[in-house]
Amino acid sequence: MRPLTAPPKPRAIKDPAPSKWGYRWQRMMLTPGFRSAMRVGIPLVLIGVIAATYFSKEERRTQLAMQIEATKAAIQQRPEFMVTDLLVTGADEHIVADVQRVLPLDLPVSSFDLNLEEMRATVAALNAVEEARVKIGEAGTLTVDITPRVPVALWRERQTLKLIDAGGVYVGVVEARSDRLDLPLIAGDGAQTHIDEALALFAAAGPIATRVRGLVRMGERRWDMVLDRGQRVLLPEVGAMDAIRRVIALNEAQELLKRDVVVVDMRNPARATLRLSTEAATAMRRVSETGTDE
Amino acid sequence: MGDLYESQRAMRNMRKAAMQRGVIAILDVGTSKIACLVLRFDGPEQFRDSDGIGSLAGQSSFRVIGAATTRSRGVRFGEVDAMQETERAIRTAVQAAQKMANVRVDHVIACFSGARPRSYGLDGAVDIAGGTVTDGDIGRVMAAADVPDYGADRHVLHAQPVNFALDHRSGMADPRGQIGNKLTTDMHMLTVDATVIQNLFFCIKRCDLELAGLASSAYVSGISSLVEDEQELGAACIDLGGGSTGISVFMKKHMIYADAVRMGGDHVTGDISMGLQVPMATAERIKTFYGGVVATGMDDREMIEIGGDTGDWERDRRTVSRAELIGIMRPRIEEILEEVRVRLDAAGFEYLPSQQIVLTGGGAQIPGLDGLAAKILGQQVRMGRPLRVQGLPQAATGPAFSGAVGLTLFAANPQDEWWDFDIPADTYPARSLKRAVKWFKDNW
């Protein structure tokens, strides 16, 4: 019997030729510029369009911003990043107190919120501090390493005694001269700019150092060395060292300064001039009148 | 001829542009198959540093990076018959080749076998008055060749200078720079039907491709399958194609004659189909598997199942002996070869110093064809396979691809043709000058 169902028809051979548009599409895809545009450009544009549509509403933008902020805060507030301690090294307690005063820290604080360069500048701006290094060390410690200024002299300005370092920079205040007997005393306007000279003069004063009270800058150009018993050595503007050496030599040869001399004027290097005290002058006049010393 | 001159020149410029882009496609539009090769040009001197030698006769400068073949449709006798079908077949081949090459091609050089090619020998002479021969002189002497009236419906496909003679010295390949009084040239001109070219042009244009060159398939298969000394001494290349059989005669490395017989392998298949009452596809299959031209006693006993797709599968189990098949094929092949013989005789092939005959094309694969051809065409017959070119897949190295391979060589270094030389100044611009003067006269 013939089968009732029709035998399967042989499948018609498919036309191997590409359609016109398929052919064109393939050629387009083989064009490098078009190909890269399709593979990169269109996805980029799509992403851009989707993002723009999503963020066109105000609340979504704020929500995203808030989310970003929250994530940032969550990371920054992690205990690994927290600064819990302030350690000041290389300075005495006055400077430490100053540093703690000028650095407005309410610990603990995240290290992301600290501006180390600004803090360093603030600390270095303190008078007593020559140089400062700020770093966040291990275990959340903010370390401020300080090189303090070393005072080399006392400077009397009106009623206060100021400490100054070799550069003439004001370091601090002392209550009384007796607090820092180790430092020489200088005074007078413009004295602070010639500290080196003053220190050299103090050093040169060796044998009479115990008698030196201090140096006074006169007229912002020359020094007077003030000794005890109200004696003064007036030094010239130029060649002050030679002058003071001559004074010392005179003192050793003739014990000049033990005599009743008020002023030794060395301003003219060719001729040292002495001024006697009033009693000495009177006695001397009497001697010259009578020829005898009573 | 000016119009054609311009269009051929435009094609040459297109080819130059394609060379600069580095990619060009080769399209062999045949009756039984359409082959498309994609070539990449590297520049001739690319490997001089690493290899120490120049390119191998210019043939290492390109590489086949894509190859595709498809069954041809809509082509008869090597001519476009159904344009839509041909267009689709070309699209198939081009797309597959592009896909293999992974590059887009815009320029294509095509060859076809039909369109009733006709050869003309031209000669021209100019006086150069004792000066040296320049490019302009060569253009002039070619323009001086008197062109026969080949008909308004035909186009010049090739116009190649074959020989130059300066005074009494003949056989020069390149007379430039030499001194003489009279320069004469022999040219070979090949004309084909204009409508065929137009149809092919239109087909290729509809595939969004630009035609960068056209060649006769008889010529290009001669380039690829004749070895150099055969081209030098004189040989004929018989390209047994599907719908037509191309003949090209070479001498001194120039084609001097080309023709085509409008019969080919498809006619053999048609004969088998009619003789054995089988469909064309079966006939084609039987032909390729069992075909031959010389029957022996063994062939009487070798039975071929021809099947027959009549629907009555139980009873239609016809068989045929191979001797019968050969009996169908042989007369047709003899007819084709006889026709070729006539064309060669008409061309005066027997006067050439060497009469080598090279059979190529898909039809040359019939077993025993060389013996049959030797009886009809002469003793010196051999089977020709195309030259090896770089990157060509193994499947495309058979004799059926000699046209496509020859076209790659043609694309890589084409022979100088008439339109490669500038039109002499005294003919073309004089007219335009006259036109300009006329325009001034008319307007003022």
Image: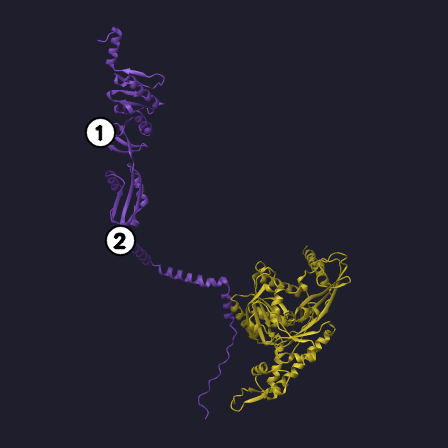
SS for callout 1: helix
What residue did someone put label 1 on?
Answer: A178
Which chain does yellow denote in the image?
A: B
Q: How is the image coloured?
A: by chain
Q: Position of residue B357 (x, y in %)?
A: 68, 74
What residue did someone put label 2 on?
Answer: A79
Left or right of B43: which side holds A215?
A: left
Name the quarter where the C terminus of chain A is drawn.
top left
Q: Position of residue A208 (x, y in %)?
A: 27, 23
Left or right of B319: which side holds A114?
A: left
Residue A189 seen anywhere in this rendered image of the structure: no
Residue nearest the observer in this picture, A126 or A32: A126
Which chain does purple denote in the image?
A: A
Residue B5 seen anywhere in this rendered image of the structure: yes
Question: Which chain contains the residue that carries disc 2?
Answer: A
The tag earlier along the polypeptide, 2 or 1, is 2
Query: Is A245 placed above or below A124 here?
Result: above
Q: What distance separates the C-alpha of mark 2 from that of mark 1?
A: 50 Å
